[in-house]
Amino acid sequence: GRLLVFPMDGSHWLSMLGVIQQLQQKGHEVVVIAPEASIHIKEGSFYTLRKFPVPFQKENVTATLVELGRTAFNQDSFLLRVVKIYMKVKRDSSMLLAGCSHLLHNAEFMASLEESHFDALLTDPFLPCGSIVAQYLTVPTVYFLNKLPCSLDSEATQCPVPLSYVPKSLSFNSDRMNFLQRVKNVLLAVSENFMCRVVYSPYGSLATEILQKEVTVQDLLSPASIWLMRSDFVKDYPRPIMPNMVFIGGINCLQKKPLSQEFEAYVNASGEHGIVVFSLGSMVSEIPEKKAMEIAEALGRIPQTVLWRYTGTRPSNLAKNTILVKWLPQNDLLGHPKTRAFITHSGSHGIYEGICNGVPMVMMPLFGDQMDNAKRMETRGAGVTLNVLEMTADDLENALKTVINNKSYKENIMRLSSLHKDRPIEPLDLAVFWVEYVMRHKGAPHLRPAAHDLTWYQYHSLDVIGFLLAIVLTVVFIVFKCCAYGCRKCFGGKGRVKKSHKSKTH
Amino acid sequence: GRLLVVPMDGSHWFTMQTVVEKLLHKGHEVVVVVPEVSWQLTKPLNFVVKTYAVSHTQEDLNREFKIFIDAQWKSQQEGGILPLLDSPAKGFFELLFSHCRSLFNDKKLVEYLKQTSFDAVFLDPFDVCGLTVAKYFSLPSVVFSRGIFCHYLEDAAQCPSPPSYIPRMLLKFTDTMTFKERTRNLLAYMGERAFCHKFFKSAADIASEVLQTPVTMTDLFSPVSIWLLRTDFVLEFPRPVMPNVIYIGGINCHQGKPLSKEFEAYVNASGEHGIVVFSLGSMVSEIPEKKAMEIAEALGRIPQTVLWRYTGTRPSNLAKNTILVKWLPQNDLLGHPKTRAFITHSGSHGIYEGICNGVPMVMMPLFGDQMDNAKRMETRGAGVTLNVLEMTADDLENALKTVINNKSYKENIMRLSSLHKDRPIEPLDLAVFWVEYVMRHKGAPHLRPAAHDLTWYQYHSLDVIGFLLAIVLTVVFIVFKCCAYGCRKCFGGKGRVKKSHKSKTH
């Protein structure tokens, strides 16, 4: 078959690669489309890359990422932070929206896509540009995602989300909440639409223009046949799901390769204390100097060798046990038996690599779902979370010593690891299966719940409840009236006497 | 590991047996606990079977079931599960429920079970006893069933099922309902919540007696680790599910074996018209004479050869094309390319054999989930449902001719067949995996939603909503009062004048 892939740039793309490679090996033709200003999406041997022009440069994208990393370390007040993040999201998303608009108005490019007659589209709906392309080309869609903000995913799949035990993103709640935490959860649910409207509603207008019919963001997202979710219930809390959601968490923990000589040498030189792996992900290139010095100081205080992936300026107080590298084979290093701990920004990839390899974590979440990931690992006793803005060298030192020396952390992460890896089918095979399924059957309409055709009050049976209440009230009213009438008849004499008596006194 | 199996009699056991056999084959020690009086369970098996004495005889069992079945030929219940409360089925269920008391009266058996340290219980919840056993020995449990009666899946798995698009059991509604149907559906749901416990009263009483603490059905169901449900979304309407609810529909479809000489001869002799397979399942041995004659008449009017599995008296008007047999290799016959149609009582096993082999069906549901199965196949255009009480020979003839000659039925069932068989893992392997999973990990606590620890009003966030409403109302009230006060101050002169003016007039 012929598959069109419209990925998101960044780490999202990296875990999609494995799926594409498998699909190509199974004999499918894969075409990847990406903006010319892409950072990670490059030519590959197992797919055809077709780039489309966008009204911004690669440098602009890099700049926004650098800025994103910087905002995470900003020591502003809460309100100022919110405003700054809001402004940034608005700026970045309008840039990305312009890219999308440029693509959809590129008649030549779109026509060539149409001619290719794809069987399905694999896309990350984080930005629903792929969803518009899918509707324009009328091809069934498979989504490949971590999570959508503002419950857009649960609305689009009609998946019930009881706010009483499913914590909202960024709420720092677990699945067991006290009353005030539940209040917070409900308030977040009410207010989250504000941020989302800025990013998402322009796509509705864009789609309305391109498809020449009234389209909301919901209409864009809900036709997706299969949702491949990069999580599972070892990391996430159990909650209701829908039949067309497929959980492929841990898809990025592929077979480990042996370490290169350079890293092998580092690990061997670490002696009995072993090593600690430290990476804040590919998005953070620079840490403010003061913070970096504090981190370096803490790292110097532990007996382990620390391998720190860092591209910024070398902190002047870097201890002997700390080795700065521009890049490290994270999954392979975590799989090494000498690895004692993992300092991570708790992005979903890093978290799953930690779970797969059973390495206790010290987590420094910076933005997005990283806070949620850290909270989940912390409640399961598999790691310690630090607030990157407030933490001191002592905090980091203590956290590291705790996860390394307190055996419960290792035990918990090993338990999670064994639960996670105990599955009837590998996530990569599952993802490939469902993409092929959608290609074979031209979608999966039999997995689409009838709830899509109901209004919100019908869905909650409010019309029926109202109707039944009306009947009950009517019956009660009539019965009451009848009784009253009956009473008056029975005790008629008395009543009338009383009445006439009363009326006389007036 | 060691596995304790508490099965249910009848066709339920056929598929459960295949799972148990596979587990045995994988090297697990299996102990099956069965009553000494039963239809299928006492047949020789190649694993350890422990029987316990019961207070009734085989004749009692047959008689109670016959009372139930005979009633189905007189009138069929409408309106969901509620009429079951006071129906001829009651006696049969009481007999089943009483098994549990007999089991626990067998002190030697209980002692044996206590001494043998099992890893898990694999049970069919139909007679409730398996749940009581799991709770008594505090063992993690895996449920194996077509569906769960009443609202116990909603309660015990915390699985949401909005009554607006999920039809309740035995109502014959689809997932698209009119206002009237939605009203009846909601009423049926409320009825279940109000009255179901009465149906299971003696089962819950026996469990309370055994456990020496009062328990409800929800208490018995709620510790279940994994729910294996013998259905899938080709048959069932898509609905919210929970991570520990696993769908294994079609587990009973095996690769067809070659037919025996007897049946091969029948099929070959059928010529170009092919054959029709007719069976009302293993539970129905006799059809009222008048009905049987009508059926025989209709069968005589079609050009196909009919193979009718029937153990009752031979109808006098049986046509030449109809062959009565005491037993037939149903799955193998349905898999034969010459099979044109399948007349079935639409039990879930038969339905899945029809789907697997792609044979259009004429359905005569008799009781239980058969009505629901028939409705589902009918909405998908893969069969025609007949009311077994009201149908005439003409109806049956027309139905048969329709499904055989109207190509859409064959096309629809073939589409369902291809969707059903297109799965990443075979249902039998999936069932075996999850039973082993629960044995390995001593349950699956990480799949247990936190919703279990909430009260109903907490679950629906009613307390939070009430609290927030109270705040909003208080604020509105205060603001209103302040405004009123402010207004009075500002336009004080006027107001006072008016007031004093007014008061003077009084």
Image (spheres, coloured by chain):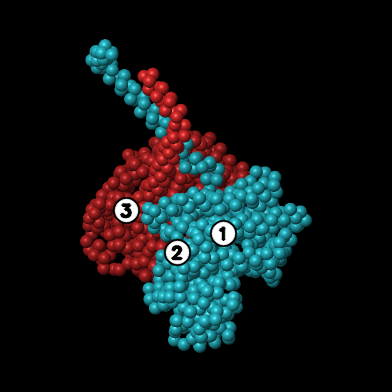
Chain colours: A cyan, B red
The residue mark sitting in front, 2 or 1, is: 1
Quadrant of the rendering where the N terminus of chain A is positioned: bottom right
- Secondary structure beneath label 3: helix
Q: Which residue is mark 1?
A: A85
Q: Are marks 2 and 1 in contact (CB under 8 Å)?
A: no
Looking at the rendered image, the disc whose residue lies closer to the viewer, 3 or 2, is 2
Cβ atoms under marks 1 and 3 closer than 8 Å: no
Q: Which mark is residue B359?
A: none
Locate the C terminus of chain A by quadrant. top left
The image shows residue B243, relative to residue B504, as above or below, that is: below
- Which residue, given by chain and number where applicable, does mark 3 sit on? B219
- Residue A250 shows in the view: no
Callout 2: SS: helix
Q: Give the amino acid type for the residue marked by disc 2 in the picture.
A: Arg
Residue type at mark 1 is Ile
The residue carrying pointer 3 sits among few (fewer than 14), some (14 to 19) or many (20 or more) residues within 10 Å by Cα, namely some
Q: In the picture shown, does residue A225 fall above or below A390? A: above
Q: Residue A108: which quarter of the image?
A: bottom right
Q: Residue furthest front?
A: B493
Pointer 2 local density, CA inside 10 Å: few below 14, some 14–19, many at least 20:
many
| Nearer-the-camera pick, B369 or B12 | B369
- Looking at the image, can residue A212 be seen? yes
Q: Residues within 10 Å of mark 1 (few under 14, many from 20)?
A: some
Q: Circle 2 sits on which residue?
A: A376
Residue at point 70% right, 69% down? A43
Q: Residue at left 54%, top 87%?
A: A265
Q: What amino acid is found at the position of numbered circle 3 in the picture? A: Asp
Q: CA distance from mark 3 to mark 2?
A: 28 Å
Q: Residue A177: horizontal and vertical position, in percent?
A: 39, 56
- From the viewer's side, name the closer residue of B100 and A285: A285
Residue at 59% across, 72% down: A285
